[in-house]
Image: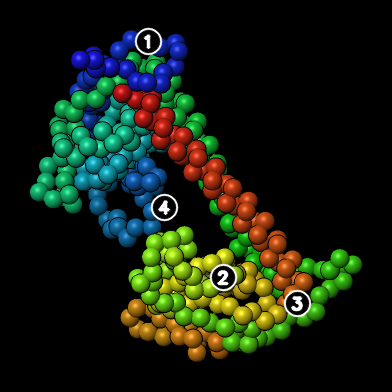
Amino acid sequence: MAEKKSSPELRFPEFEGEWEERKLGEFFSSRREKGNSSLPIYSVSQSKGLVPRESLNRNIQNDANPKDNLVVQPTDLAYNMMRMWQGAVGTATEPCMVSPAYVVLKAKIGNNSLFFLYLFEKRRSKYLFTAYSYGLTLDRLRLYYKDFANIRLSAPKGEEQQKIASFLTAVDQRIELLQKKKAKLEEYKKGVMQKLFSREIRFRDENGNEFSDWEEKRLGEILIIGSGKDYKHLKEGDIPVYGTGGYMLSVSDYLYDGESVGIGRKGTIDKPIYLTGKFWTVDTLFYTHSFKKVLPFFVFIVFQQMDWKKYNEASGVPSLSKSTLEKIKIYLPSLPEQQKIADFLSILDRNTKQVGIQIEKTQGWKKGLLQKMFW
């Protein structure tokens, strides 16, 4: 029988030797320092870590005595006792305080809090946090410090902890920069679209001349609205079926072949979908066809700008009807200007998509690193 390894698959070359499995109480002590009114209040977000409470837009009463809160010092970890099994843990970058429903962990000398923050992301760690929590149901589980302290995990010595933490922090910073870049591109597109549709900015033709004025049209004048149908009688195939939430599955026949824009008939009515090629739509998703003096992709751009909720015809589940859609008035530029607008916005979408792909790849790379760099 092969001997069980006690060191990770991927390791920096200057380190060797076994990782030591120890109780977490040997790495961390519990900080119980009382808060004071000079410190900001922080909360843990599962996606963002330890952040100012006000940034989470939560409706939380803030009339508790500051002395009831717990102080968190820079490099401390703080976790929500009821959500530790879901990864609700973060590290402080400034002195702050948190609710007494949290546990504050102070790293013992020679240990790196950030290393353990990454270690706690692993599935094995979350499993142990769940197993050591007390409660009859998941929504009542609590991981107290005394139980946290008894959990056994493997870790290297402090110098290697620091090296791993610094490397993975650099990866996280790369992801954060890409996310900010994507957000800026999306914000830029939003601002450009507002100016285009208010005609604050206009394109010109190849000779530098202005295009003709935009004309008001009803949707029923420029396209036909088709109804989706049930697909359950169809065999499995390679034709995509779309609902209001996007792609669902693939079948053997198609409802329409060509460019189209889908808009929800019932349920999600404010998420238009650009469709092309052969496809099928279910009965909760209208599709458009037979376009007259309008580009399908330009219709998609217009639909993205619209406030669909004001056309809702139901008090319960949001709904739209063909007759309502056909009466909606929009302003259309000439076909050449539509094309220029569509081409410009397509470039922005392509750039944004590329950044999104970079984010996914980097996140996937990080996930692989977590599997290989930790034991």
Query: Which sits earlier in the primary sequence, circle 3 or circle 2?
Result: 2
Q: Is residue 190 left or right of residue 78?
A: right
Q: Name the element at disc 1.
A: loop
Q: Residues within 10 Å of mark 1 (few under 14, many from 20)?
A: few
Dot in front, 1 or 4: 1
Q: Amino acid at mark 4?
A: Ser
Q: Amino acid at mark 2?
A: Asp
* Quadrant in which residue 91 is drawn: top left
Residue at position x 47%, y 26% in the image: 167
Residue at position x 44%, y 82% in the image: 320
Q: Name the element at disc 2.
A: strand
Q: Name the element at disc 3.
A: loop
Q: CA distance from mark 1 to mark 3?
A: 69 Å
Quarter of the figure with the N terminus: top left
Of residues 234 and 45, the one drawn nearer to the viewer in this rendering: 234
| Disc number for residue 16 | 1
Which residue carries the number 2 mark?
Answer: 257
Residue 152 in sight: yes
Q: Amino acid at mark 3?
A: Ser
* Quadrant in which residue 26 is drawn: top left
Q: Is residue 284 left or right of residue 217?
A: left
Q: Pointers 4 and 2 in contact (CB under 8 A)?
A: no
Which residue carries the number 3 mark?
Answer: 334
Which residue carries the number 4 mark?
Answer: 55
Q: CA distance from mark 1 to mark 4?
A: 43 Å
Q: Name the element at disc 4.
A: helix
Q: Residues within 10 Å of mark 4 (few under 14, many from 20)?
A: few
x and y percentages locating residue 153 in the rendered image: 24, 25
Q: CA distance from mark 1 to mark 2?
A: 61 Å
Dot in front, 4 or 3: 3
* Quadrant in which residue 364 is drawn: top left
